[in-house]
Image (cartoon, rainbow, N blue to C red):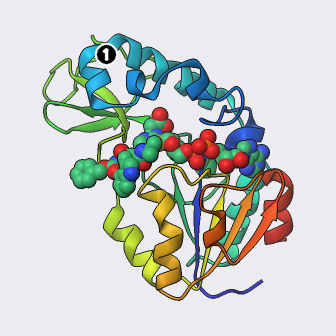
């Protein structure tokens, strides 16, 4: 399959069959905890222990998970067509562990960030309010993930890729979180064809030219073949 430059956006659905809970499906993360209590800077300022516990749990689950056939298929596609860009909203490392190079627009569980001096380092398996920054020793370490109300990472780079995409593909995302949910509109404006690979209709399905419905570990390898 040769579609010119392909830009792919993945969400929690691509990791669901690796055993990692999505956010908004039945049994999802937001059924057990309010995003306002664990995924905003205000929540971290208010109750860092609760936020650290949430990300420690997710870091452990992500470390115990394995990439599935969908992650492997995207890594194969990128190896065959190195101009393929994969932007992920996910904070797990399953794309990298399948051999792909990805842009983590919402950060990564593997990263720690110092809220005092902006130093970044590899997160320990468990973080808490005694985890000090190795550069400035300030105990203000936080997970290096993008919370609601914070600017996602690499937005200019991503905008450049959306401008030059021939095909934009969204995989395993509900299209409810911006600015990622707006990428399909940006790609269309730039003249790209658009394809959604998802288990169910998303909030932005109408914006896509084509759709494949099914579990990612089945429909992504079939699409990549
Ligand atoms: C910002 C990291 C501004 C942490 C996350 C308009 C424009 C801009 C912003 C906004 C806007 N309107 C509202 C906002 C604010 C907000 C927002 O979008 N709110 C929503 C709730 C309305 N956006 C923000 O705050 C963003 N920041 O805009 O900053 C700014 C400007 C200037 C200066 C400073 C700031 C930041 C958003 C990032 C928040 N962080 N995560 C963490 O992971 O804990 S977002 C969170 O939701 C996850 O990261 C996830 O990536 C993201 C999206 O969820 P999905 O990945 O789509 O997962 P979901 O469960 O929803 O859906 C799963 C899908 O998979 C489903 O469709 C399902 O059918 C499918 N599926 C399930 N199983 C399978 C499957 N598909 C295939 N196979 C399967 N087996």
Please give the name of the residue rendered at 47% of the width and 86% of the height, measured from the top-left corner: 190
Please give the name of the residue rendered at 72% of the width and 56% of the height, measured from the top-left corner: 201
Query: Which quarter of the rendered picture does the C terminus lie within?
Result: bottom right
Image position, residue 175 (x, y; %): 57, 54
Residue behind label 1 places its C-beta within 8 angstroms of ligand 1: no
Is residue 77 rendered to the left or right of residue 188? Answer: right
Tell me: residue 187, above or below residue 134.
Answer: below
The local crowd at label 1, few if under 14, some if 14 to 19, many if 20 or more residues have their Cα within 10 Å, is many
> Number of labelled discs?
1
Image position, residue 20 (x, y; %): 67, 33
Q: Nearer the viewer, residue 52 or 188?
A: 188
Tell me: residue 71, above or below residue 131.
Answer: below
Image position, residue 56 (x, y; %): 48, 20
Q: Mark yes or no: residue 147 visible.
A: yes
Image position, residue 142 (x, y; %): 31, 27
Please give the name of the residue rendered at 50% of the width and 73% of the height, measured from the top-left corner: 185
Please give the name of the residue rendered at 74% of the width and 32% of the height, measured from the top-left corner: 19
Query: Which quarter of the rendered picture does the N terminus lie within?
Result: bottom right
Q: Mark yes or no: residue 152 visible.
A: no
In which quarter of the view is residue 82 placed?
bottom right
Is residue 113 rendered to the left or right of residue 225? Answer: left
Describe the element under mark 1 as helix, strand or loop.
Answer: helix
Tell me: residue 73, above or below residue 57.
Answer: below
Residue at numbered disc 1 = 48
Tell me: residue 121, above or below residue 107.
Answer: above
């Amino acid at each position: 399959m040769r579609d010119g430059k392909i830009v792919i956006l993945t969400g929690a659905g691509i990791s669901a069959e690796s055993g990692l809970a999505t956010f908004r499906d039945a049994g999802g993360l937001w059924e057990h905890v309010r995003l306002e209590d664990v995924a905003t800077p205000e929540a971290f300022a208010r109750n860092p222990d609760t936020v650290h516990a949430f990300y420690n749990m997710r870091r452990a689950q992500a470390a115990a998970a394995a990439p599935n056939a969908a992650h492997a298929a995207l890594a194969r596609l990128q190896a065959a067509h190195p101009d393929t860009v994969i932007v992920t909203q996910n904070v797990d490392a399953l794309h990298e562990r399948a051999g792909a190079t990805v842009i983590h627009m919402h950060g990564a569980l593997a990263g720690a960030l110092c809220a005092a001096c902006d130093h970044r380092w590899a997160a320990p398996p468990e973080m808490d309010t005694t985890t000090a920054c190795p550069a400035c020793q300030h105990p203000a370490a936080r997970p290096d993930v993008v919370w609601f109300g914070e600017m996602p990472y690499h937005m200019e780079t991503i905008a450049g890729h959306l401008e030059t995409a021939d095909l934009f593909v969204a995989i395993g995302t509900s299209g409810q979180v911006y600015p990622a949910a707006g990428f399909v509109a940006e790609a269309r404006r730039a003249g790209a064809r658009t394809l959604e690979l998802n288990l169910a209709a998303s909030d932005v399905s109408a914006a896509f030219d084509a759709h494949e419905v099914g579990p990612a570990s089945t429909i992504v390898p079939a699409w990549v073949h």
